[in-house]
């Protein structure tokens, strides 16, 4: 007479196969969540860089100043190292906000956005002729400083390695 049902070994093998499948599905879900978060941060970085570029173009007089006098080109903010930005100029609803005060306001608002929107966020605005490093296949934080180079807006965050993940080049 033949026994009906499953043996203990068969049940254990089936449970093992099920556990491996559940673990694999969980790992795939976690990887998808991380990818979604990085993509969302990348989109936010692109929007932030484009917004700052538009502010600079709207305040062309100040954005065209040389490096030492240009508050936009002095922007190098690391949220992890500098903490929350201190209060800045108030240009909302103010009748007279001169171009330098407006630039200070723009820089402050950008620092606040980096601090709030990116984990360990960093932004740098500088003149850079070659932000891409071919040997490393990535962007770099350092800037060439060449006065004829275009303005580069570099945005990065914790979890992105030690290089910016988004760089927007602004035409002169």
Image: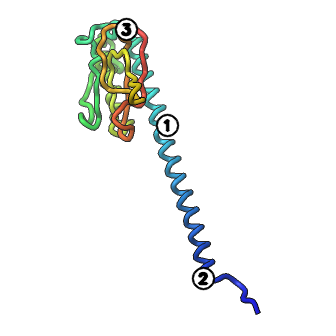
Q: Going 50% across and 48% down the picture, which residue do you hit?
A: 31
Front residue of 2/40: it is 2
Left/right placement of residue 19 relative to residue 78 reads right
Residue lying farthest to the right in this orientation = 1
Local packing at callout 3 (Cα closer than 10 Å; few below 14, some 14-19, many 20+) is some
Mark 3 element type:
helix
Residue lying farthest to the front in this orientation = 135
Q: Position of residue 34 (x, y in %)?
A: 47, 45
The answer to the question of whether label 2 and label 3 lie on touching residues, with beta carbons closer than 8 A, is: no
Local packing at callout 2 (Cα closer than 10 Å; few below 14, some 14-19, many 20+) is few
Q: Going 53% across and 61% down the picture, which residue do you hit?
A: 23
Q: Position of residue 29 (x, y in %)?
A: 53, 52
Left/right placement of residue 106 relative to residue 23 reads left
Q: Which residue is mark 3?
A: 60
- Which mark identifies residue 8? 2
- Which mark identifies residue 77? none
The answer to which quarter of the image holds residue 102 is: top left
Looking at the image, residue 46 lies above or below residue 4: above
The answer to which quarter of the image holds residue 10 is: bottom right
Local packing at callout 1 (Cα closer than 10 Å; few below 14, some 14-19, many 20+) is few
Q: CA distance from mark 3 to mark 1?
A: 31 Å
Q: Going 41% across and 12% down the picture, which residue do you hit?
A: 57
Q: Position of residue 136 (x, y in %)?
A: 39, 30
Sequence order check, earlier mark of 3 and 1: 1
Mark 2 element type:
helix
Sequence order check, earlier mark of 1 and 2: 2
Front residue of 6/118: it is 6
Q: CA distance from mark 1 to mark 2?
A: 46 Å
Mark closer to the observer (3, 1): 1
Q: Which residue is mark 1?
A: 39
């Amino acid at each position: 007479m033949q026994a009906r049902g499953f043996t203990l070994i068969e049940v254990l093998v089936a449970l093992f196969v099920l556990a491996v499948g559940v673990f694999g599905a969980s790992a795939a879900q976690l990887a998808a969540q991380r990818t979604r978060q990085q993509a969302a941060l990348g989109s936010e970085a692109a929007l932030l860089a484009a917004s700052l570029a538009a502010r600079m173009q709207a305040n062309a007089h100040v954005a065209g100043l040389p490096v030492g006098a240009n508050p936009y080109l002095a922007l190098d903010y690391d949220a992890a190292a500098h903490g929350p930005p201190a209060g800045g100029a108030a240009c909302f609803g103010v009748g007279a906000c001169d171009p330098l005060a407006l630039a200070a306001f723009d820089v402050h608002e950008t620092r606040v956005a980096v601090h709030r929107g990116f984990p360990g966020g960093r932004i740098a605005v500088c003149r850079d002729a070659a932000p891409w490093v071919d040997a490393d296949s990535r962007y770099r934080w350092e800037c060439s400083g060449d006065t004829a180079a275009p303005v580069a807006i570099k945005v990065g965050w914790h979890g992105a390695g030690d290089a910016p993940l988004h760089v927007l080049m602004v035409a002169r």
